[in-house]
Amino acid sequence: MKCALHISEIIYCNVEKKSIKHSLLPVGGKYSLGLIVAGKPVDSALNQNQAELGIPDTGLHYDRYLREVIDFLEKDQHFREKLHNTDMEDIKQGKLAKELDFVSHHVRTKLDELKRQEVSRLRTLIKAKQDIEGGNDIAVDHQALLKQFEYLNHMNPHTFEVEDLDRLIKSATKDLENYDKERHEEFKRYEMMKEHERREHLKTLDEEGRRKEEEHYEEMKKKHADHPKVNHPGSKDQLKEVWEEADGLDPEDFDPKTFFNLHDTNGDGFFDEQELEALFTKELEKIYDPTNEEDDMVEMEEERLRMREHVMNEVDSNKDRLVSLDEFLVATKKKEFLEPDSWETLEQNQAYTDEEMRVFEEQLARQEEDLNLKAADLQKQKEDLERQQEQLNAQKLELQQVTELILEGNAVPESLGHDQPPVPPEHQPLPPGHQDIPLEQQQQHAPQNQQDLGQEHQNIPQQNQPLPPGHNSPPHDSPQMPRDHSNVP
Protein backbone atom coordinates (compact mmCIF):
# COMPACT_ATOMS: atom_id res chain seq x y z
CA MET A 1 0.00 0.00 0.00
CA LYS A 2 1.31 3.42 -0.87
CA CYS A 3 2.25 6.23 1.39
CA ALA A 4 -0.63 8.58 0.73
CA LEU A 5 -2.92 5.96 2.20
CA HIS A 6 -0.62 5.14 5.07
CA ILE A 7 0.32 8.66 5.95
CA SER A 8 -3.32 9.11 6.78
CA GLU A 9 -2.48 7.52 10.11
CA ILE A 10 -0.12 10.36 10.89
CA ILE A 11 -3.02 12.67 11.56
CA TYR A 12 -5.91 10.38 12.28
CA CYS A 13 -8.09 10.93 15.28
CA ASN A 14 -11.58 10.22 16.54
CA VAL A 15 -13.13 13.19 18.31
CA GLU A 16 -16.74 13.02 19.51
CA LYS A 17 -17.55 10.32 16.99
CA LYS A 18 -16.14 12.36 14.09
CA SER A 19 -12.93 11.33 12.45
CA ILE A 20 -10.45 13.12 10.29
CA LYS A 21 -7.64 11.62 8.31
CA HIS A 22 -5.49 12.34 5.33
CA SER A 23 -6.06 9.97 2.47
CA LEU A 24 -5.42 9.60 -1.23
CA LEU A 25 -8.06 11.41 -3.26
CA PRO A 26 -8.37 11.83 -7.02
CA VAL A 27 -8.08 15.48 -8.02
CA GLY A 28 -8.15 16.19 -11.74
CA GLY A 29 -6.83 12.74 -12.60
CA LYS A 30 -4.05 13.00 -10.01
CA TYR A 31 -3.83 12.27 -6.33
CA SER A 32 -3.59 14.55 -3.35
CA LEU A 33 -3.55 14.36 0.40
CA GLY A 34 -7.10 15.49 0.97
CA LEU A 35 -9.26 15.68 4.03
CA ILE A 36 -11.94 13.14 4.75
CA VAL A 37 -14.40 14.47 7.28
CA ALA A 38 -17.27 12.32 8.51
CA GLY A 39 -16.81 10.11 5.47
CA LYS A 40 -16.94 12.93 2.91
CA PRO A 41 -13.87 13.98 0.92
CA VAL A 42 -12.74 17.59 0.93
CA ASP A 43 -9.92 18.56 -1.39
CA SER A 44 -7.26 20.54 0.44
CA ALA A 45 -6.81 22.64 -2.72
CA LEU A 46 -10.17 24.20 -2.01
CA ASN A 47 -8.44 26.01 0.84
CA GLN A 48 -11.63 26.14 2.90
CA ASN A 49 -11.53 27.25 6.49
CA GLN A 50 -11.35 24.40 8.95
CA ALA A 51 -13.80 26.01 11.34
CA GLU A 52 -16.33 26.56 8.55
CA LEU A 53 -16.12 22.88 7.67
CA GLY A 54 -16.64 21.86 11.28
CA ILE A 55 -13.48 19.72 11.18
CA PRO A 56 -12.33 18.52 14.60
CA ASP A 57 -8.61 18.64 15.16
CA THR A 58 -6.43 15.61 15.87
CA GLY A 59 -6.23 16.35 19.56
CA LEU A 60 -2.50 17.08 19.26
CA HIS A 61 -1.32 20.37 20.73
CA TYR A 62 0.56 21.01 17.48
CA ASP A 63 -2.40 20.13 15.26
CA ARG A 64 -2.49 23.44 13.37
CA TYR A 65 1.25 23.36 12.68
CA LEU A 66 0.96 19.78 11.40
CA ARG A 67 -1.91 20.65 9.08
CA GLU A 68 -0.22 23.72 7.64
CA VAL A 69 3.05 21.90 6.96
CA ILE A 70 1.28 19.06 5.13
CA ASP A 71 -0.91 21.49 3.22
CA PHE A 72 2.10 23.32 1.78
CA LEU A 73 4.02 20.12 1.05
CA GLU A 74 1.05 18.93 -0.99
CA LYS A 75 1.46 21.95 -3.24
CA ASP A 76 4.88 20.75 -4.41
CA GLN A 77 4.54 18.37 -7.36
CA HIS A 78 7.81 16.53 -6.70
CA PHE A 79 6.92 15.86 -3.07
CA ARG A 80 3.44 14.65 -3.97
CA GLU A 81 4.86 12.13 -6.43
CA LYS A 82 7.30 10.80 -3.83
CA LEU A 83 4.48 10.64 -1.32
CA HIS A 84 2.46 8.46 -3.69
CA ASN A 85 5.32 5.99 -4.13
CA THR A 86 6.63 5.68 -0.56
CA ASP A 87 5.64 2.94 1.87
CA MET A 88 4.77 3.67 5.48
CA GLU A 89 7.85 1.89 6.79
CA ASP A 90 10.04 4.10 4.61
CA ILE A 91 8.24 7.14 6.01
CA LYS A 92 8.96 6.02 9.56
CA GLN A 93 12.62 5.52 8.67
CA GLY A 94 12.85 9.11 7.41
CA LYS A 95 13.17 8.46 3.68
CA LEU A 96 10.28 10.72 2.77
CA ALA A 97 11.68 13.56 4.88
CA LYS A 98 14.84 13.59 2.77
CA GLU A 99 12.75 14.62 -0.23
CA LEU A 100 12.31 17.99 1.40
CA ASP A 101 15.61 19.08 -0.17
CA PHE A 102 13.97 18.93 -3.60
CA VAL A 103 10.82 20.97 -3.00
CA SER A 104 10.44 24.43 -4.51
CA HIS A 105 11.99 27.53 -2.97
CA HIS A 106 8.55 29.05 -2.40
CA VAL A 107 7.40 26.05 -0.34
CA ARG A 108 10.63 25.98 1.68
CA THR A 109 10.29 29.69 2.44
CA LYS A 110 6.74 29.18 3.65
CA LEU A 111 7.79 26.23 5.80
CA ASP A 112 10.51 28.38 7.36
CA GLU A 113 7.89 30.96 8.23
CA LEU A 114 5.57 28.33 9.72
CA LYS A 115 8.34 27.01 11.94
CA ARG A 116 9.27 30.47 13.22
CA GLN A 117 5.62 31.08 14.07
CA GLU A 118 5.40 27.75 15.89
CA VAL A 119 8.57 28.41 17.92
CA SER A 120 7.19 31.83 18.82
CA ARG A 121 3.90 30.23 19.90
CA LEU A 122 5.71 27.72 22.12
CA ARG A 123 7.77 30.46 23.74
CA THR A 124 4.59 32.40 24.43
CA LEU A 125 3.04 29.32 26.02
CA ILE A 126 6.13 28.78 28.17
CA LYS A 127 6.05 32.40 29.33
CA ALA A 128 2.31 32.22 30.06
CA LYS A 129 2.78 29.06 32.11
CA GLN A 130 5.58 30.71 34.05
CA ASP A 131 3.40 33.75 34.77
CA ILE A 132 0.58 31.55 36.03
CA GLU A 133 2.97 29.70 38.33
CA GLY A 134 4.20 33.00 39.75
CA GLY A 135 7.72 32.96 38.34
CA ASN A 136 7.74 36.42 36.83
CA ASP A 137 11.13 37.28 38.30
CA ILE A 138 12.82 34.07 37.18
CA ALA A 139 14.82 34.03 33.96
CA VAL A 140 13.42 31.56 31.42
CA ASP A 141 15.72 29.15 29.60
CA HIS A 142 13.62 28.77 26.44
CA GLN A 143 16.10 26.43 24.78
CA ALA A 144 15.94 23.99 27.69
CA LEU A 145 12.14 24.12 27.85
CA LEU A 146 11.75 23.70 24.09
CA LYS A 147 13.44 20.29 24.33
CA GLN A 148 10.17 18.81 25.55
CA PHE A 149 8.60 19.53 22.15
CA GLU A 150 10.04 16.70 20.11
CA TYR A 151 8.18 17.46 16.89
CA LEU A 152 10.60 20.20 15.82
CA ASN A 153 14.32 20.94 16.02
CA HIS A 154 14.48 23.68 18.63
CA MET A 155 18.23 24.22 18.10
CA ASN A 156 17.41 25.82 14.76
CA PRO A 157 14.34 28.02 15.29
CA HIS A 158 14.62 29.84 11.97
CA THR A 159 14.48 27.33 9.09
CA PHE A 160 12.47 24.18 8.38
CA GLU A 161 14.88 21.36 7.57
CA VAL A 162 14.75 17.64 6.82
CA GLU A 163 15.07 16.87 10.52
CA ASP A 164 11.98 18.96 11.26
CA LEU A 165 9.81 16.98 8.85
CA ASP A 166 11.22 13.70 10.15
CA ARG A 167 10.51 14.73 13.74
CA LEU A 168 7.01 15.89 12.87
CA ILE A 169 6.05 12.62 11.18
CA LYS A 170 7.50 10.42 13.91
CA SER A 171 6.02 12.44 16.76
CA ALA A 172 2.54 12.54 15.25
CA THR A 173 2.63 8.82 14.50
CA LYS A 174 3.74 7.94 18.03
CA ASP A 175 1.30 10.31 19.70
CA LEU A 176 -1.69 9.01 17.76
CA GLU A 177 -0.72 5.39 18.30
CA ASN A 178 -0.97 6.08 22.04
CA TYR A 179 -4.40 7.65 21.67
CA ASP A 180 -6.40 4.48 22.35
CA LYS A 181 -4.17 3.52 25.26
CA GLU A 182 -4.73 6.89 26.90
CA ARG A 183 -8.49 6.55 26.38
CA HIS A 184 -8.47 3.18 28.15
CA GLU A 185 -6.55 4.65 31.08
CA GLU A 186 -8.99 7.54 31.34
CA PHE A 187 -11.91 5.12 31.37
CA LYS A 188 -10.27 3.02 34.08
CA ARG A 189 -9.85 6.11 36.26
CA TYR A 190 -13.46 7.04 35.56
CA GLU A 191 -14.70 3.62 36.73
CA MET A 192 -12.52 3.61 39.85
CA MET A 193 -13.65 7.11 40.79
CA LYS A 194 -17.27 6.07 40.35
CA GLU A 195 -16.74 3.10 42.68
CA HIS A 196 -14.83 5.23 45.18
CA GLU A 197 -17.65 7.77 45.35
CA ARG A 198 -20.18 4.97 45.84
CA ARG A 199 -18.18 3.61 48.77
CA GLU A 200 -17.79 7.05 50.31
CA HIS A 201 -21.53 7.59 50.00
CA LEU A 202 -22.20 4.34 51.86
CA LYS A 203 -20.06 5.58 54.77
CA THR A 204 -22.45 8.49 55.27
CA LEU A 205 -25.49 6.20 55.70
CA ASP A 206 -26.72 4.29 58.69
CA GLU A 207 -26.95 0.51 58.62
CA GLU A 208 -30.46 0.43 57.17
CA GLY A 209 -29.56 3.03 54.53
CA ARG A 210 -26.47 1.08 53.48
CA ARG A 211 -28.51 -2.10 53.15
CA LYS A 212 -31.06 -0.42 50.86
CA GLU A 213 -28.35 1.24 48.80
CA GLU A 214 -26.50 -2.05 48.27
CA GLU A 215 -29.72 -3.79 47.23
CA HIS A 216 -30.43 -1.02 44.72
CA TYR A 217 -26.91 -1.25 43.35
CA GLU A 218 -27.13 -5.01 42.81
CA GLU A 219 -30.54 -4.60 41.19
CA MET A 220 -29.16 -2.07 38.67
CA LYS A 221 -26.24 -4.38 37.82
CA LYS A 222 -28.64 -7.26 37.20
CA LYS A 223 -30.90 -5.16 34.98
CA HIS A 224 -27.94 -3.94 32.93
CA ALA A 225 -26.67 -7.49 32.37
CA ASP A 226 -30.13 -8.64 31.25
CA HIS A 227 -29.88 -7.92 27.53
CA PRO A 228 -30.02 -9.89 24.25
CA LYS A 229 -27.01 -11.85 23.12
CA VAL A 230 -24.23 -9.69 21.73
CA ASN A 231 -22.65 -11.03 18.56
CA HIS A 232 -18.89 -11.26 18.27
CA PRO A 233 -17.71 -8.00 16.57
CA GLY A 234 -16.70 -8.58 12.97
CA SER A 235 -18.20 -12.06 12.80
CA LYS A 236 -20.54 -13.26 10.08
CA ASP A 237 -23.52 -13.23 12.46
CA GLN A 238 -22.81 -9.67 13.49
CA LEU A 239 -22.39 -8.40 9.91
CA LYS A 240 -25.45 -10.29 8.68
CA GLU A 241 -27.51 -8.60 11.39
CA VAL A 242 -26.37 -5.20 10.08
CA TRP A 243 -27.08 -6.37 6.52
CA GLU A 244 -30.63 -7.31 7.48
CA GLU A 245 -31.65 -4.60 10.00
CA ALA A 246 -29.66 -1.56 8.84
CA ASP A 247 -29.46 -2.26 5.11
CA GLY A 248 -32.85 -3.97 4.80
CA LEU A 249 -31.49 -6.87 2.76
CA ASP A 250 -32.24 -10.58 2.87
CA PRO A 251 -29.74 -12.29 5.22
CA GLU A 252 -29.66 -15.26 2.87
CA ASP A 253 -28.19 -12.98 0.18
CA PHE A 254 -25.32 -11.76 2.35
CA ASP A 255 -22.24 -11.02 0.27
CA PRO A 256 -18.99 -9.75 1.96
CA LYS A 257 -17.82 -7.67 -1.02
CA THR A 258 -21.21 -5.99 -1.43
CA PHE A 259 -21.35 -5.39 2.31
CA PHE A 260 -17.91 -3.73 2.22
CA ASN A 261 -18.88 -1.41 -0.62
CA LEU A 262 -22.12 -0.46 1.13
CA HIS A 263 -20.35 0.59 4.31
CA ASP A 264 -17.25 2.14 2.77
CA THR A 265 -19.08 5.44 3.07
CA ASN A 266 -16.35 7.60 1.53
CA GLY A 267 -15.63 5.18 -1.27
CA ASP A 268 -11.86 5.16 -0.79
CA GLY A 269 -11.59 1.36 -0.75
CA PHE A 270 -10.88 1.12 2.99
CA PHE A 271 -12.68 0.85 6.29
CA ASP A 272 -11.28 3.51 8.58
CA GLU A 273 -11.86 3.42 12.32
CA GLN A 274 -15.01 5.52 12.18
CA GLU A 275 -16.57 3.33 9.51
CA LEU A 276 -15.78 0.24 11.55
CA GLU A 277 -17.28 1.68 14.74
CA ALA A 278 -20.48 2.50 12.86
CA LEU A 279 -20.93 -1.23 12.26
CA PHE A 280 -21.26 -1.91 15.99
CA THR A 281 -24.15 0.46 16.71
CA LYS A 282 -26.77 -2.32 16.57
CA GLU A 283 -24.83 -4.45 19.04
CA LEU A 284 -24.34 -1.55 21.43
CA GLU A 285 -28.06 -0.72 21.36
CA LYS A 286 -28.71 -4.18 22.79
CA ILE A 287 -26.73 -3.28 25.91
CA TYR A 288 -27.17 0.45 26.41
CA ASP A 289 -30.20 2.72 26.51
CA PRO A 290 -29.65 6.37 27.48
CA THR A 291 -33.07 6.45 29.18
CA ASN A 292 -32.18 3.62 31.59
CA GLU A 293 -30.68 4.43 34.99
CA GLU A 294 -28.53 1.31 34.91
CA ASP A 295 -26.85 2.10 31.57
CA ASP A 296 -23.79 4.37 31.50
CA MET A 297 -23.13 6.03 28.14
CA VAL A 298 -19.44 6.49 28.98
CA GLU A 299 -19.23 2.72 29.25
CA MET A 300 -20.97 2.40 25.89
CA GLU A 301 -18.20 4.39 24.18
CA GLU A 302 -15.58 2.25 25.86
CA GLU A 303 -17.38 -0.85 24.59
CA ARG A 304 -17.39 0.60 21.08
CA LEU A 305 -13.65 1.20 21.32
CA ARG A 306 -13.04 -2.38 22.51
CA MET A 307 -15.00 -3.77 19.55
CA ARG A 308 -13.16 -1.65 17.02
CA GLU A 309 -9.76 -2.57 18.47
CA HIS A 310 -10.66 -6.25 18.38
CA VAL A 311 -11.62 -6.15 14.71
CA MET A 312 -8.52 -4.16 13.80
CA ASN A 313 -6.30 -6.69 15.55
CA GLU A 314 -8.02 -9.56 13.74
CA VAL A 315 -8.34 -8.07 10.24
CA ASP A 316 -5.77 -5.27 9.79
CA SER A 317 -2.85 -7.46 8.79
CA ASN A 318 -0.39 -4.68 7.91
CA LYS A 319 -1.28 -2.64 11.04
CA ASP A 320 -1.90 0.62 9.20
CA ARG A 321 -5.16 1.22 11.12
CA LEU A 322 -7.14 0.77 7.92
CA VAL A 323 -8.95 -2.30 6.59
CA SER A 324 -8.65 -2.78 2.85
CA LEU A 325 -11.12 -4.77 0.78
CA ASP A 326 -8.56 -7.55 0.37
CA GLU A 327 -7.93 -7.76 4.12
CA PHE A 328 -11.68 -7.84 4.75
CA LEU A 329 -12.32 -10.63 2.24
CA VAL A 330 -9.47 -12.72 3.66
CA ALA A 331 -10.92 -12.33 7.16
CA THR A 332 -14.36 -13.59 6.03
CA LYS A 333 -12.79 -16.92 5.16
CA LYS A 334 -11.30 -17.54 8.60
CA LYS A 335 -12.81 -19.84 11.19
CA GLU A 336 -13.12 -16.95 13.65
CA PHE A 337 -15.46 -15.21 11.21
CA LEU A 338 -17.68 -18.24 10.71
CA GLU A 339 -17.56 -19.77 14.23
CA PRO A 340 -16.55 -17.03 16.64
CA ASP A 341 -16.26 -17.27 20.40
CA SER A 342 -18.82 -15.47 22.54
CA TRP A 343 -18.15 -11.79 23.20
CA GLU A 344 -17.62 -10.73 26.80
CA THR A 345 -19.00 -7.28 27.49
CA LEU A 346 -17.71 -4.76 29.99
CA GLU A 347 -19.82 -5.99 32.87
CA GLN A 348 -18.10 -9.34 32.45
CA ASN A 349 -14.66 -7.73 32.35
CA GLN A 350 -14.09 -5.26 35.15
CA ALA A 351 -11.92 -2.39 33.95
CA TYR A 352 -9.62 -2.51 37.00
CA THR A 353 -8.23 -5.01 39.47
CA ASP A 354 -8.64 -4.95 43.24
CA GLU A 355 -4.98 -3.98 43.57
CA GLU A 356 -5.41 -1.07 41.14
CA MET A 357 -8.43 0.09 43.14
CA ARG A 358 -6.45 -0.06 46.37
CA VAL A 359 -3.59 1.99 44.90
CA PHE A 360 -6.06 4.46 43.41
CA GLU A 361 -7.76 5.05 46.76
CA GLU A 362 -4.40 5.47 48.47
CA GLN A 363 -3.49 8.11 45.91
CA LEU A 364 -6.79 9.87 46.53
CA ALA A 365 -6.17 9.77 50.28
CA ARG A 366 -2.72 11.32 49.81
CA GLN A 367 -4.13 13.97 47.52
CA GLU A 368 -6.85 14.75 50.05
CA GLU A 369 -4.25 14.98 52.83
CA ASP A 370 -2.13 17.33 50.73
CA LEU A 371 -5.16 19.47 50.00
CA ASN A 372 -6.04 19.60 53.69
CA LEU A 373 -2.49 20.65 54.56
CA LYS A 374 -2.59 23.35 51.93
CA ALA A 375 -5.99 24.48 53.18
CA ALA A 376 -4.67 24.65 56.75
CA ASP A 377 -1.63 26.58 55.57
CA LEU A 378 -3.82 29.01 53.67
CA GLN A 379 -6.04 29.43 56.73
CA LYS A 380 -2.97 30.19 58.87
CA GLN A 381 -1.78 32.72 56.32
CA LYS A 382 -5.22 34.29 56.37
CA GLU A 383 -5.19 34.56 60.16
CA ASP A 384 -1.68 36.07 60.10
CA LEU A 385 -2.79 38.63 57.55
CA GLU A 386 -5.84 39.48 59.65
CA ARG A 387 -3.64 40.01 62.72
CA GLN A 388 -1.28 42.19 60.72
CA GLN A 389 -4.24 44.17 59.48
CA GLU A 390 -5.49 44.67 63.04
CA GLN A 391 -2.03 45.90 64.08
CA LEU A 392 -1.92 48.30 61.16
CA ASN A 393 -5.38 49.58 62.03
CA ALA A 394 -4.30 50.14 65.67
CA GLN A 395 -1.17 52.00 64.54
CA LYS A 396 -3.25 54.10 62.18
CA LEU A 397 -5.69 55.00 64.98
CA GLU A 398 -2.80 55.90 67.30
CA LEU A 399 -1.26 58.15 64.66
CA GLN A 400 -4.60 59.84 64.12
CA GLN A 401 -4.93 60.51 67.87
CA VAL A 402 -1.39 61.93 68.10
CA THR A 403 -2.06 64.16 65.11
CA GLU A 404 -5.25 65.45 66.71
CA LEU A 405 -3.41 66.25 69.96
CA ILE A 406 -0.73 68.16 68.08
CA LEU A 407 -3.34 70.14 66.20
CA GLU A 408 -5.24 70.93 69.43
CA GLY A 409 -2.02 72.22 71.10
CA ASN A 410 -1.53 74.70 68.24
CA ALA A 411 -5.12 75.85 68.01
CA VAL A 412 -5.67 79.39 66.58
CA PRO A 413 -7.59 81.94 68.77
CA GLU A 414 -11.20 82.33 67.81
CA SER A 415 -10.63 86.03 67.02
CA LEU A 416 -8.46 84.97 64.09
CA GLY A 417 -11.26 82.95 62.62
CA HIS A 418 -11.77 79.26 62.28
CA ASP A 419 -11.00 79.19 58.62
CA GLN A 420 -7.34 80.16 59.08
CA PRO A 421 -4.80 77.42 59.87
CA PRO A 422 -3.02 77.67 63.25
CA VAL A 423 0.17 79.79 63.21
CA PRO A 424 3.25 78.18 64.79
CA PRO A 425 4.62 80.05 67.85
CA GLU A 426 7.79 81.16 66.09
CA HIS A 427 5.70 82.86 63.39
CA GLN A 428 3.21 84.61 65.67
CA PRO A 429 3.57 88.51 65.84
CA LEU A 430 5.20 90.09 68.96
CA PRO A 431 3.50 92.80 71.02
CA PRO A 432 4.34 96.45 70.15
CA GLY A 433 7.84 97.46 71.21
CA HIS A 434 8.99 93.86 71.25
CA GLN A 435 9.60 93.44 67.59
CA ASP A 436 13.01 92.18 66.73
CA ILE A 437 15.50 94.91 65.79
CA PRO A 438 18.38 94.08 63.47
CA LEU A 439 21.73 93.78 65.24
CA GLU A 440 23.30 96.70 63.34
CA GLN A 441 20.48 99.01 64.35
CA GLN A 442 20.83 97.86 67.93
CA GLN A 443 24.56 98.77 67.91
CA GLN A 444 23.94 102.17 66.30
CA HIS A 445 21.25 103.18 68.75
CA ALA A 446 22.68 101.58 71.88
CA PRO A 447 24.34 104.80 73.36
CA GLN A 448 21.35 106.97 72.50
CA ASN A 449 19.03 104.50 74.02
CA GLN A 450 21.09 104.37 77.17
CA GLN A 451 21.14 108.21 77.32
CA ASP A 452 17.44 108.35 76.74
CA LEU A 453 17.00 105.76 79.41
CA GLY A 454 18.99 107.95 81.87
CA GLN A 455 16.91 110.97 81.02
CA GLU A 456 13.79 109.00 81.56
CA HIS A 457 15.07 108.05 85.03
CA GLN A 458 15.83 111.72 85.82
CA ASN A 459 12.32 112.74 84.88
CA ILE A 460 10.74 110.30 87.31
CA PRO A 461 8.62 112.30 89.85
CA GLN A 462 10.14 112.77 93.33
CA GLN A 463 7.36 111.00 95.05
CA ASN A 464 8.02 108.01 92.98
CA GLN A 465 11.82 108.00 93.52
CA PRO A 466 13.29 105.52 96.03
CA LEU A 467 14.33 106.91 99.49
CA PRO A 468 17.68 106.30 101.18
CA PRO A 469 17.87 103.66 103.82
CA GLY A 470 16.11 104.70 107.00
CA HIS A 471 13.95 107.24 105.18
CA ASN A 472 11.32 104.85 104.02
CA SER A 473 7.89 106.00 104.95
CA PRO A 474 6.08 103.87 107.46
CA PRO A 475 3.00 102.14 106.40
CA HIS A 476 -0.08 104.30 106.34
CA ASP A 477 -1.91 102.06 108.78
CA SER A 478 0.87 102.09 111.46
CA PRO A 479 0.54 104.74 114.32
CA GLN A 480 2.71 107.88 114.16
CA MET A 481 5.42 107.75 116.79
CA PRO A 482 6.99 111.03 118.06
CA ARG A 483 10.62 111.46 117.13
CA ASP A 484 13.21 111.26 119.85
CA HIS A 485 15.63 114.11 119.11
CA SER A 486 17.69 113.61 122.23
CA ASN A 487 20.12 111.35 120.59
CA VAL A 488 20.45 113.44 117.49
CA PRO A 489 23.66 115.40 117.40
Image (cartoon, rainbow, N blue to C red):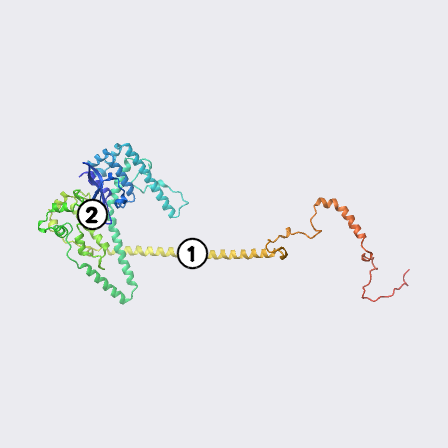
Closest to the camera, between mark 2 and mark 1, is 2
Percent x, y for residue 351? 23, 54
Residue 227 in the figure: left or right of residue 462: left
Q: In the image, which disc is placed on residue 399?
A: none
The residue closer to the viewer here, 459 or 48, is 48
At x 64%, y 50%, the residue is: 427
* Quadrant position of the N terminus in the picture: top left
**Image height of 255 relative to 386, above or below:** above
**Image height of 151 relative to 434, above or below:** above
Percent x, y for residue 298? 24, 54
Q: In the image, which disc is placed on residue 274?
A: 2
Q: Is residue 351 visible?
A: no
Amino acid, disc 1 = Lys
**Residue 355, picture quadrant:** bottom left
Q: How many marks do you count on the picture? A: 2
Percent x, y for residue 285? 18, 55
Residue 157 in the figure: left or right of residue 310: right
At x 23%, y 63%, the residue is: 216
Instruction: Tell me the CA gap for discs 2 and 1.
Output: 54 Å
Amino acid, disc 2 = Gln
- Give the SS element for disc 2: helix
Q: In the image, which disc is placed on residue 382?
A: 1
The residue closer to the viewer here, 1 or 442, is 442
**Image height of 466 relative to 480, above or below:** above
The residue closer to the viewer here, 97 or 103, is 103
Badge 1 crowding class, 10 Å Cα cut-off, few under 14, some 14 to 19, many 20 or more, is few
The tag earlier along the polypeptide, 2 or 1, is 2
* Quadrant position of the C terminus in the picture: bottom right
